[in-house]
Image (cartoon, rainbow, N blue to C red):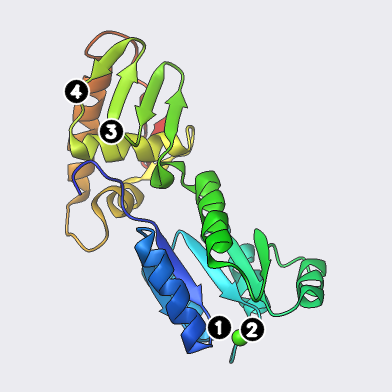
Amino acid sequence: MAGHVQQPVVLVVEDETAQREVLAYNLEAEGFRVAKAENGEDALLMVREEKPDILILDWMLPRVSGIEVCRRLKTKSETRGIPIIMLSARSEEIDRVRGLETGADDYVVKPYSVIELMARVRTQLRRSRPSSVGERLEYEDLVLDTETHRVYRGNNLLKVGPTEFRLLSTLMEKPGRVWSREQLLDRVWGRDIYVDTRTVDVHVGRLRKALTLHGGENPVRTVRGVGYSLG
Ligand code: CA
């Protein structure tokens, strides 16, 4: 996995076992990591535990309904940014869900085509996490190619280690956003590995060195008491 960003995590919330398993199978085949929940209550727990990058959320669920799950996630600042694709059995239901202004990012009517649903998952991730779906990221004179794993500044190909590559791709996804060291650890190293937050500082230092080797200003800003941001 050297050089790759963390696999996107898709949380599938569906009470019908067969549908849930088909979705999980297809998502895994597409290279996603899948978390599953069979009711709304578990879904809310899983969001906290798994920190998914996207939710596929059935409307009709036991315990807490899909609409309520959606509403709760979209009203909290920590979870508002997670894209949600709502599934529903009938188009009239979708119209109703839309009317309720739950804040879902996309709506799909059952029975859906799995291929189309996968395409919609990619579309949502492209917006929220571009580096996870094979994109070219650009910021000022910096270009990062997630397919070839190359980084250019102006006309220079830069020598960037795998960790620095993941760090830079995370920063380039949202220029101007301030990331805490803990958030960078989660995203770049993965939350299963124990790494000290000072490690982040070490790799930011290496990244800055690589970025400024052929001249140009250092684009990675230290935000005192908070963390780092690009620009
Ligand atoms: Ca259902």
Q: Is mark 3 within 8 Å of ligand 1?
A: no
Q: Earlier in the sequence, mark 3 or mark 4?
A: 3
**Residue at disc 1, secondary structure:** helix
* Dot placed on the residue nearer the N-terminal end, 1 or 4: 1
Residue 151 has which mark?
none
Q: Position of residue 176 (x, y in %)?
A: 49, 33
Residue 39 coordinates in the image, percent (x, y): 53, 86
Secondary structure of the residue carrying tag 2 is loop
Disc 2 + disc 3, Cβ < 8 Å: no
Q: Name the residue nearer the viewer: 93 or 103.
A: 93
Mark 1 in CB contact with mark 2 (< 8 angstroms): yes
User: In the image as oriented, which residue stretches furthest toward the bottom?
Assistant: 62
Tell me which label, 1 or 2, sits earlier in the chain. 1
Q: Is residue 201 visible in this depiction of the protein?
A: no
Give the label on residue 40, or none. 1
Circle 3 is placed at which residue position? 149
Q: How packed is label 2: few (under 14 Cα within 10 Å), some, or many (20 or more)? A: some
Q: Nearer the viewer, residue 185 or 225?
A: 185
Q: Which residue is mark 4?
A: 159
Which of the labelled discs sits on residue 65, or is there none?
2
The image position of residue 21, as x and y in percent, is 43, 80
What distance separates the C-alpha of mark 3 from that of mark 1? 39 Å
